[in-house]
């Protein structure tokens, strides 16, 4: 083979395969071309050693802080909104939850408004009892919905697992955020239940609050072992079962046409046994 | 090696999940991608632009563009490679803009003022004849910065992607929006120019070291 030209020699240095064997053979016999290749190598090696400043371990976080506010919210396509679309996507996605939380807030406002109306208005005994029933029905609805959402978070955590066997961490940031939101509501409902003398409901809400607090204070990403601990915590307290029982009971009360006061007394007694 | 490949595959899988979640409306999922790939993109951007300020701007813009174009990202592709290419594309535009600004500000011959900041690491004293040590000498580092700065934005991009990023010709062609043969030619031209500029200094230093009479 005749001497390779500069382009061929640089391509050879870069690992390109064209005429590789022939050039390699030529280099063995030609000290001139070997020296030329060494000169190419010396320049590229010097350039490769040029230092690049290290932006730091937290550089990615800084980049996120700088761009996060400039990222428009993406609208999920309708098929992603079907229940079961993933751990955080679709039905359980943040946008959906924002809407549910807004509805819950309206219900809570309605309930609180009812309470204040009662305190400032003098009404006959019959009207007072009717107002009491309406208020209780609103409370039942709101607490029932709150328990339903809490149940969903607990069920998701109880069933959560790495989406891939190679994954070492499970991301529970969405569940954590929802637990934080539920905590505030839970405190309000627990206090109200106590004021109303519904000790059983207050107890269940108290236990739920502790579990929600655990979840809200968990890291965003947990190892399967940490997730197992959270799961045992949920199962150990039997909180999921209690939430389901009370939720079901509240649903029956909401649907029941019987006067609330009568039903109220018996169910409170039953629940206080759980 | 097997473990490394598994780790790369695992990263690719979790990247794909993060992309899917972002597309489903979970904006926070994009954070994972930003935190995972920012440093790598920064290294490319710094080598292309030659200064930290522009490099950081390239990184931010690359992720903003990646977020905007995420619907176009093919699920089977590698997110790291994809955002790397977006960064290379933007860096070319940024370098062209910078060159035109510099040309307007400094009409002719401001030798020695290449507008590139000096990295403190490059001030470390030369102690051994290895290429790493040689590159750390301020004098040679200055020559290298100047030589890189004399390349056209396309040549510099092609060189950085090929020799620092290990990118294939097809990938470079895509970033340069050119044909494969044109990209191959751009890579060659960049190395040829760098050789012309740097060979005398690299050789002289090598010889000086060999003779024990360093400059």
Image: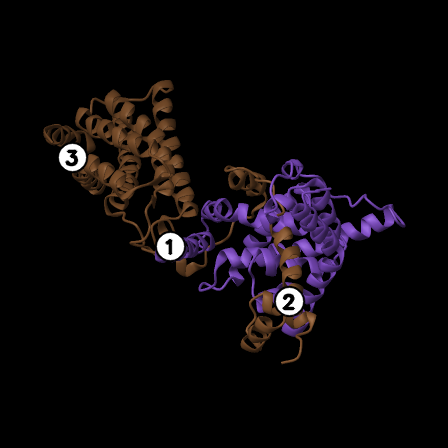
Q: In brown, which chain?
A: A
Side (left or right) of B84 relative to B113: left
Residue A72: give x, y in percent of width and height. 56, 48
Side (left or right) of B122 relative to B200: left
Q: Mark 3 lies on which chain?
A: A
Inter-mark Cα distance, 3 to 1:
33 Å
User: Camera-side residue: A15 or A60?
Assistant: A15
B156, above or below B179, in the image: above
User: Camera-side residue: B60 or A125?
Assistant: B60
Q: Do the residues labelled 3 and 1 touch (CB within 8 Å)?
A: no
Residue drawn at point x = 29 percent, y = 27 percent? A127
Q: Are marks 3 and 1 on the same chain?
A: no
Which residue in the structure is indicated by mark 1?
B10
- From the viewer's perspective, is the residue at label 2 or at label 1 nearer? 2
B155, above or below A121, in the image: below
Q: Colour of chain B?
A: purple
- For the N terminus of chain B, give its image quadrant: bottom left
Query: Is label 2 in a helix, a strand or a loop?
Result: helix
Q: Which residue lies furthest to the right in this view?
A: B108
Which residue in the structure is indicated by mark 2?
A10
Residue drawn at point x = 26 percent, y = 20 percent? A195
Label ID, residue A236:
3
Query: Is label 1 in a helix, a strand or a loop?
Result: helix
Residue B44: give x, y in percent of width and height. 60, 51
């Amino acid at each position: 083979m005749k001497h390779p030209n500069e382009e061929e020699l640089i391509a050879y240095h870069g690992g390109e395969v064209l005429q590789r064997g022939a050039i390699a053979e030529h280099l063995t016999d030609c000290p001139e071309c070997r020296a030329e290749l060494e000169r190419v190598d010396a320049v590229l090696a010097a350039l490769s050693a040029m230092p690049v400043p290290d932006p730091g371990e937290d550089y990615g976080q800084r980049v996120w802080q700088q761009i996060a506010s400039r990222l428009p919210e993406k609208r999920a396509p309708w098929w992603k909104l079907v229940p079961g679309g993933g751990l955080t996507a679709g039905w359980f996605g943040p946008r959906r939850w924002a809407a549910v939380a807004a509805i819950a807030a309206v219900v809570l406002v309605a309930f609180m408004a009812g309470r204040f109306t009662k305190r400032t208005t003098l009404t006959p005994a019959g009207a007072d009892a009717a107002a009491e029933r309406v208020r209780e029905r609103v409370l039942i609805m709101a607490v029932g919905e709150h328990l339903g959402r809490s149940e969903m978070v607990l069920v998701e955590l109880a069933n959560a697992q790495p989406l891939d066997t190679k994954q070492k961490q499970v991301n529970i940031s969405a569940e954590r955020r929802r637990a934080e939101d539920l905590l505030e509501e839970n405190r309000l409902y627990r206090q109200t239940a106590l004021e109303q003398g519904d000790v059983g409901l207050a107890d269940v809400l108290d236990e739920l609050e502790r579990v929600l607090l655990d979840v809200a204070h968990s890291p965003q990403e947990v190892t399967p072992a940490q997730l197992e601990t959270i799961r045992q915590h949920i199962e150990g307290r039997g909180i999921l079962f209690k939430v389901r029982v009370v939720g079901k009971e509240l649903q029956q009360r909401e649907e029941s046409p019987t006067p609330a006061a009568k039903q109220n007394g018996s169910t409170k007694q039953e629940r206080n046994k759980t | 090696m097997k473990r490394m490949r598994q780790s790369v595959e695992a990263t690719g899988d979790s990247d794909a999940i993060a992309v899917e979640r972002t597309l489903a409306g979970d904006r926070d999922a994009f954070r994972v991608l930003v935190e995972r790939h920012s440093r790598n993109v920064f290294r490319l951007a710094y080598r292309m632009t030659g200064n930290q300020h522009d490099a950081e701007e390239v990184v931010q813009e690359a992720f903003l563009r990646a977020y905007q174009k995420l619907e176009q990202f093919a699920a089977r592709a590698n997110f790291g490679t994809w955002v790397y290419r977006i960064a290379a594309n933007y860096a070319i535009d940024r370098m062209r803009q910078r060159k035109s600004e510099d040309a307007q500000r400094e009409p002719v011959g401001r030798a020695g003022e290449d507008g590139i900041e000096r990295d403190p690491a490059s001030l470390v004293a030369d102690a051994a004849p290895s290429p790493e040590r040689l590159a750390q000498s301020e004098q040679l580092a200055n020559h290298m910065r100047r030589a890189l700065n004399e390349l056209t934005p396309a040549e510099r991009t092609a060189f950085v992607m090929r020799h620092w990023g290990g990118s294939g010709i097809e990938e470079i062609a895509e970033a340069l929006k050119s044909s494969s043969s044109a990209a191959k030619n751009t890579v060659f031209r960049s190395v040829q120019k760098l050789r012309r500029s740097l060979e005398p200094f690299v050789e002289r230093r090598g010889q000086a070291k060999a003779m024990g009479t360093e400059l």
